[in-house]
């Protein structure tokens, strides 16, 4: 077999020829040696970078990335989600959000309900030089890939028929009160939507109304009216519904003690012995609680701490 023109044992001039042939340009024009390192010279095409928009987020602002399922009404129907709430789908969303927080540790808190999740990055985060496009694309792509990856853990008997899609947006909040009001708004939205959906699907599933008839029945009703329908017609006290449905899910970082079994060899003993070891780890923990009042923020002041 003929010997290749360049090989490991080739001389320095031959290797230089090889390098020239590989890059397709002369050494002087494209590749130069600087103290033993190869550095790429700028090309005439680099001016196209001037068209990139500076999307650096303002300093000293909370960076919120909110993602929503794209056309999830159809997705839920195609995959036979239970109405009005499907625990499998809600737990899967939370699992994906936990994965995002574990990968992007600058997230201070997250809140989710239905097919949306909001991720709050720390005020002083320097992650990717605070570029908005990096925040949004990393969060949405990590979440979407996690949704597909963990699907079978929650929908064991339901095949994923097609890939889900998620869109994202970024909003900056300069003050702690602005951020708290944003999260309060999303939790209030959770309550409003869940109360409506609970009554709506009771009218459809148990009273036999069509979706159009149920919608007409609820048109113009207030929260008190909906609660009355649930209690008087279906014997349901809305306040006894699971907190996950009514309040959504809050994700925070918490120190958790984990007990592990470890084999160790004690002095003057020939055989290993199993002992329990307690280790403290910081993990992403889901909570189902009220975040509109002050009690939550008083209990977890480190979330809004300036040096967090």
Image (cartoon, rainbow, N blue to C red):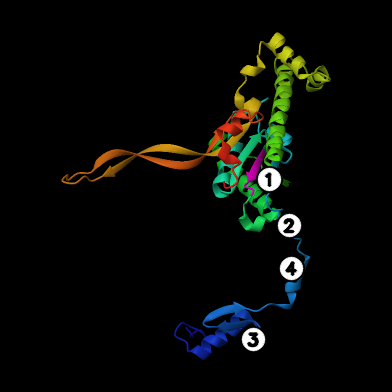
Would you call the spot at circle 3 few (<14 residues within 10 Å), some (14-19), or many (20 or more)? few
Where residue 46 appears, x then y in whole percent?
72, 73
Highlighted range, magenta: 117-123
Residue 65 tag number: 1
Q: Which residue is mark 4?
A: 49
Q: Which residue is mark 2?
A: 55
**First along the sequence among labels 1 and 2:** 2
Disc 2 is placed on an element classified as loop
**First along the sequence among labels 1 and 3:** 3
**First along the sequence among labels 1 and 4:** 4
* Residue 64 in sight from this viewpoint: yes
Q: Is residue 107 left or right of residue 270?
A: right
Q: Which residue is mark 3?
A: 26
Residue drawn at the location 56% of the way across and 84% of the way down:
18
Q: Work out whether 111 lies above or below 239.
A: below
**First along the sequence among labels 3 and 4:** 3
């Amino acid at each position: 077999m003929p010997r290749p023109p360049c090989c490991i044992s080739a001389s320095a001039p031959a290797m230089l020829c090889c390098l020239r042939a590989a890059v397709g340009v002369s050494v002087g024009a494209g590749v130069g040696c600087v103290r033993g390192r190869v550095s790429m010279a700028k090309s005439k095409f680099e001016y196209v970078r001037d068209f990139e928009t500076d999307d650096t987020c303002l300093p000293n602002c909370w960076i919120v990335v909110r993602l929503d399922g794209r056309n999830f009404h159809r997705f839920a129907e195609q995959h036979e989600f239970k109405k009005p709430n499907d625990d499998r789908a809600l737990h899967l969303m939370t699992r994906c959000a936990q994965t995002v927080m574990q990968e992007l540790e600058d997230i201070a808190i997250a809140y989710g309900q239905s097919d949306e999740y909001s991720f709050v990055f720390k005020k002083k985060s320097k992650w990717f030089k605070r570029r908005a496009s990096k925040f949004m694309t990393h969060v949405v792509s990590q979440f979407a890939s996690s949704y597909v990856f963990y699907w079978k853990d929650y929908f064991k008997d339901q095949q994923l028929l097609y890939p889900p899609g998620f869109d994202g947006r970024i909003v900056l909040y300069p003050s702690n009160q602005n951020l708290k009001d944003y999260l309060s708004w999303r939790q209030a939205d959770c309550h409003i939507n869940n109360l409506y959906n609970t009554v709506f699907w009771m009218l459809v599933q148990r009273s036999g109304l069509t979706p159009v008839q149920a919608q007409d029945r609820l048109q113009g009703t207030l929260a008190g009216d909906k609660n009355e329908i649930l209690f008087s017609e279906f014997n349901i006290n809305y306040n006894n519904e699971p907190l996950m449905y009514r309040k959504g899910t809050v994700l925070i970082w918490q120190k958790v003690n984990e007990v592990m079994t470890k084999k160790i060899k004690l002095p003057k003993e020939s055989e290993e012995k199993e002992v329990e070891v307690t280790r403290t780890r910081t993990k992403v923990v889901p909570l189902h609680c009220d975040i509109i009042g002050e009690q939550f923020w008083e209990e977890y002041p480190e979330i809004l701490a300036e040096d967090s």
